């Protein structure tokens, strides 16, 4: 990774001992599904000790909280993101977002134990959300997340096409969103897809090979997840709006 603001943020987090996992667009780049992002996003352990380390790292980056909520463990534990803006010369203007809880994603301890470590030239170890967790974190109401989710799983499929492991095949059938690849995979791994069809109804359409029906079912899956995500965020957004009103009084 060439020198850039994200590299500075990553090295600072490591130097200050922050237990954090890279996620968001920068993590997608590492997994081979490039995404342009001006922000750097982290999942962090919400313990007093770790948040003290995070505060120290943000101090080094001369990063202040922007917008709401404030930097407080209670907001992180309820699922809010806390947003910082760096004023460090090597990371000028970089926005750094941190979260602890995400809808449909495991607790931080599980994420940490399942993490992927990338060893990057000139930067060293970068602890990153495992691919399956990154995919889960992208299942939101936001339009931009769905094409990236698709590209993440496609990239993994092509990278491991020749000799996939059973867990990789299972991951594909649970997460692939490309009709043509789903049909191709069903032909390659007929026993595996039948074993999982009861857990993902869409796979019954894949077995039929009807691409139009598969696309319709993929769209239905997406609509359902977007609805669930809007419901999850509704009380959190209401809380943020109340914080904004309180701040303006």
Image (cartoon, rainbow, N blue to C red):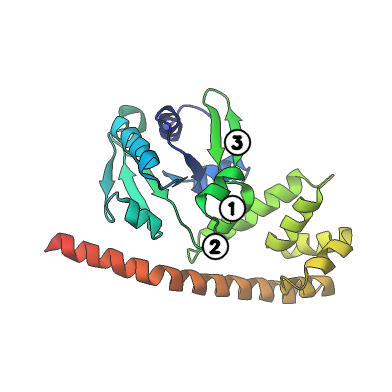
* Residue 128, quarter of picture: top right
Badge 1 is on which residue? Answer: 133
Relative to residue 65, is residue 96 drawn left or right? right
Residue at 31 percent of width and 70 percent of height: 238
Disc with the residue nearer the chain's start (3 vs 2): 2
Q: Quote the CA–CA distance across marks 2 and 1.
A: 9 Å
In which quadrant will I find the N terminus? top right
Residue 227 at what x, y percent from top left? 50, 74
Asked if labels 1 and 2 touch by Cβ distance under 8 angstroms, the answer is no
Disc with the residue nearer the chain's start (2 vs 1): 2
Residue at 72 percent of width and 71 percent of height: 199
Badge 2 is on which residue? Answer: 104
* Residue 115, quarter of picture: top right
Badge 3 is on which residue? Answer: 117
Disc 1 on helix, strand or loop? Answer: helix
Residue lying furthest top: 122
Residue 162 at what x, y percent from top left? 84, 45
Disc with the residue nearer the chain's start (1 vs 3): 3
Q: Quote the CA–CA distance across marks 1 and 3.
A: 14 Å
Question: Is residue 94 something that shows in the picture?
Answer: no
């Amino acid at each position: 990774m060439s020198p850039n603001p994200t590299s500075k943020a990553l090295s600072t987090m490591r130097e200050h001992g922050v237990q954090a996992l890279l996620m968001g667009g920068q993590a997608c780049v590492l997994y081979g599904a490039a995404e342009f992002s001006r922000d750097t996003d982290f999942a962090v352990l919400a313990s007093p000790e770790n948040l003290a380390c995070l505060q120290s790292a943000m101090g080094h980056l001369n990063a202040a909280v922007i917008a709401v909520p404030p930097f407080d463990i209670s907001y992180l534990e309820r699922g809010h993101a806390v947003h910082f803006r760096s004023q460090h010369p090597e990371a000028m203007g970089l926005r750094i977002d941190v979260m602890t809880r995400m809808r449909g994603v495991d607790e931080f301890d599980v994420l940490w134990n399942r993490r992927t470590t990338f060893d990057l030239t000139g930067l060293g170890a970068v602890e990153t959300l495992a691919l399956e967790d990154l995919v889960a974190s992208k299942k939101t109401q936001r339009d931009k997340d769905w094409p990236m989710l698709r590209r993440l799983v496609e990239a993994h499929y092509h990278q491991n096409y020749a000799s996939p492991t059973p867990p990789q095949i299972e991951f594909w059938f649970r997460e692939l969103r490309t009709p043509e690849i789903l049909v191709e995979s069903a032909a390659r791994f007929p026993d595996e897809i039948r074993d999982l069809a009861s857990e993902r109804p869409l796979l019954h359409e894949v077995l039929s090979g009807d691409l139009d029906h598969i696309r319709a079912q993929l769209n239905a899956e997406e609509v359902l997840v977007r609805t669930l995500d809007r419901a999850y965020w509704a009380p959190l957004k209401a809380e943020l709006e109340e914080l904004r009103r309180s701040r303006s009084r």
